[in-house]
Image: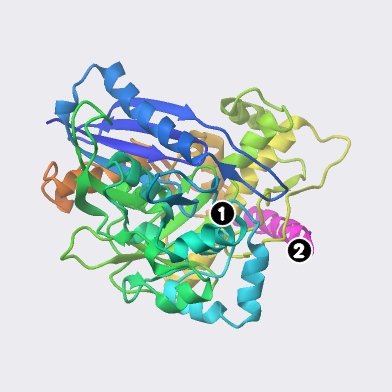
Amino acid sequence: MSMILSLDQGTTSSRAILFDREGMIRGVAQREFLQFYPRAGWVEHDPEEIWSSQRDVAREVIAETGISSQDIAAVGITNQRETTIVWDRKTGAALYPAIVWQDRRTASICDQLKAEGKADLIQNKTGLVVDAYFSGTKIQWILDHVPGARAKAQNGELACGTVDSWLIWKMTGGKVHATDPSNASRTMLFNITTKDWDDELLAALNVPRSMMPQVIPSSYVLGETTSDFLERSLPIGGIAGDQQAALFGQNCLRHGMAKNTYGTGCFMLMNVGNQVRPSKNRLLATVAWQTGMDQPYEYALEGSVFIAGAAIQWLRDGLGIVQSSSEIEALASSVPDNGGVYFVPALAGLGAPHWDAYARGTIQGITRGTTKAHLARAALEGIAFQVADVLDAMRQDSGLAIEELRCDGGASVNNLLMQFQADVLQATVVRPKIVETTALGAAYLAGLAVGFWKSVEEVQTIWQSERVFEPAMASAEVKRIREQWSEAVHRSQQWIRP
């Protein structure tokens, strides 16, 4: 067996990637799926389309590469986190569309939890701030709004989970209802110190414990796919939420190593070792992974930016400024600077370190001389500015300088963005040879579980850098533009009144 099949179920598309023993990509299949916006601030997916798109790309990548399922040693899964699905245990049918991590409908539930004085309790147990971003309030909302759902849940007839749990249920024909600690730690219901679902938190959100999946290690053979998923049953050996998978794929395996993924959102994680490190700067303490039943949890600090690549998609789809996202770099490079324009892409509120569910996107500094090129450049810079705000908080929490940031994700191929990122961080930005580190991390975890790779040390020898970006902007100019950015952020906050 010469390959690992990595299933990368993202916010806008499902992908299947084949990796060989050197961590090189041998095949990719991708399929976008529909996004639904039924009301302002609501974002939904069709759970069956999530499943069918992921199943179909798995079959497609095998057909296109001409390999046999006999060549695949294991399957790894990585997924969009926090997106929540509730389904009927008997029929396997979802009760309601998947409520996506970007969805803000439960902001009022979060306000109520804060008003009840539960914010500190939740943060102390889960490492999370109280926010609509996480899964717990989404589960509560479904139980409260779908007729008959709460009665079914109390009778033990319903299952819930993040997207990994949904895929595992489907792939195993309903035999396995499981998740891993990296995904469990994003629900606002999992105690990251006791390493179990927390009865006090379940009660606070009125979610029956019977709905929750079993939590198993991130690198562990939890079961096998049904034979009709591919040509034969395959072991499922790895699960990790997309950002923790990217941290593993970037080989940030030592305390103090950090990465940022530029996807639909931006997600910066720093490995903090085997102890939970609570944040004083509104970052999240989260589980990074567990590499086996007898292994300790690894933890991370995380800063989440809700809108990054999604801002470029909005320029493409909403405004028609470009025909494809790949055009954005050339357009932005056609002007020497942003022309005084600042784009705060708070299209789904602001994440770390602001956590403002009522912020909204703003474009400021527009004059008669502003062109679409300035808007394109301001959008790219807005991504980098948000990342810089998170890194500042991470530096303060960790007490470390963090002089290198490893980058990955779709937008990391944009050289203008990466250079500007190095400038505003005043730190080195390193892009790896394989930027699909989310899928690679899931492949590593699955491969380790079945002995495809013998050890973490072997995995570490595979990672290679492709390009290094060093800061070139004068520090005085960095200070000036970051102060202007901070003013723009301030003006975007609390735009919608609760």
For the record, the magenta segment spans: 475-498
Q: Residue at x 52, y 37 (%)?
A: 12
Residue 494 image label = 2
Within 10 Å of disc 1 (Cα), the crowding (few <14, some 14-19, many 20+) is: many
| Vertical side of 462 occupied by 187: above or below | below
Q: Earlier in the sequence, mark 1 or mark 2?
A: 1
Q: How is the image coloured?
A: rainbow
Residue that badge 1 annotates:
305
User: Do we see residue 434 in this rendering?
Assistant: yes
> Residue 252, percent across and down?
31, 55
| Vertical side of 464 occupied by 290: above or below | below
Q: Residue at x 54, y 72 (%)?
A: 281
Along the line of sight, the residue nearer the viewer: 496 or 354: 496
Say which amino acid is labelled 1: Val
> Residue 240, percent across and down?
34, 51
Along the line of sight, the residue nearer the viewer: 181 or 365: 181
How far apart are the alpha carbons under marks 1 and 2? 17 Å
Q: Residue at x 27, y 23 (%)?
A: 62
Along the line of sight, the residue nearer the viewer: 399 or 273: 273
